[in-house]
Structure formats: C-alpha cells, structure tokens
Image (cartoon, helix red, strand yellow):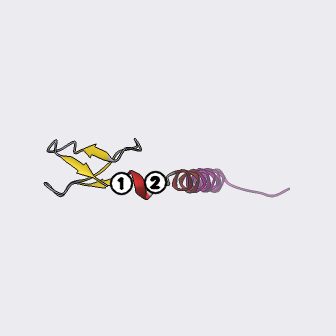
Amino acid sequence: MIAINFSLAVALFAVLFLAVFFGLWVCAKRQKDKDLSLDDRFIWFCGVCTYTYINTRDDGFSTCPRCGSYNKK
C-alpha cells in the first residue's frame, strides 16, 4: 500500500482539478475561435466618420450606425 499524507492528497487533487479545468478551457477557446469567422463582404467602412462596422445584410448600400450616412461597397 502507498502511504500518503493528507496535505499531499489535497495538493494532488487540486493540481489534477486545475489541469482538467485548464484543458477544458483551452478546448472551448479553440472551438470558439474556430466558429468566429467573418466574411469580408460584411465589414463596412464609413467614409464620413471613419467608423468600421459589421452589416450582415447583403445590400449594395449600408447606413453607418454612428453617424447615419449612407455607404456604398
């Protein structure tokens, strides 16, 4: 039988728990980064106030959310 004191057992449990938690966090972060891809046609740049914004509608014109001016792709 392996003799182990209580403080070593608690330390091993804490390290194991933190390692599993960290591994799950890394996997979730990779999956989230993989899902976030944005097409360049949805990124708009306002010529008046120089604001960069996202408009997911596939139109030729877009209204800037900051200044309200119309922008053409």
* Image label count: 2
Q: Is residue 13 magenta?
A: yes
Q: Position of residue 21 (x, y in %)?
A: 58, 50
Residue 57 image-quadrant placement: top left
Q: Are marks 1 and 2 in contact (CB under 8 Å)?
A: yes
Q: Nearer the viewer, residue 47 or 31?
A: 47
Q: Position of residue 34 (x, y in %)?
A: 56, 55
Secondary structure found at label 2: loop
Residue 50 image-quadrant placement: bottom left
Q: Is residue 14 magenta?
A: yes
Q: Amino acid at mark 1?
A: Ile
Q: Is residue 2 left or right of residue 25?
A: right
Q: Amino acid at mark 2?
A: Leu
Tell me how far mark 1 sits from mark 2, CA to CA: 8 Å
The magenta segment: 1-27
Q: Quadrant of the C terminus?
A: bottom left
Q: Residues within 10 Å of mark 2 (few under 14, many from 20)?
A: few
Q: Nearer the viewer, residue 3 or 50?
A: 50
Q: Residues within 10 Å of mark 1 (few under 14, many from 20)?
A: few
**Residue pointed to by mark 1:** 43
Residue at the (42%, 58%) spot, across then down: 40
Q: Nearer the viewer, residue 55 or 15?
A: 55
Examine the residues drawn in magenta and state their main secondary structure: helix
Residue at the (86%, 56%) spot, across then down: 1
Q: Position of residue 45 (x, y in %)?
A: 26, 56
**Most extreme residue toward the right, as rendered?**
1
In the rendered image, the vertical position of residue 48 relative to residue 63, given as above or below = below
Q: Which mark is residue 16?
A: none
Q: Is residue 20 left or right of residue 65?
A: right
**Residue pointed to by mark 2:** 38
Secondary structure found at label 1: strand
Q: Position of residue 30 (x, y in %)?
A: 57, 57
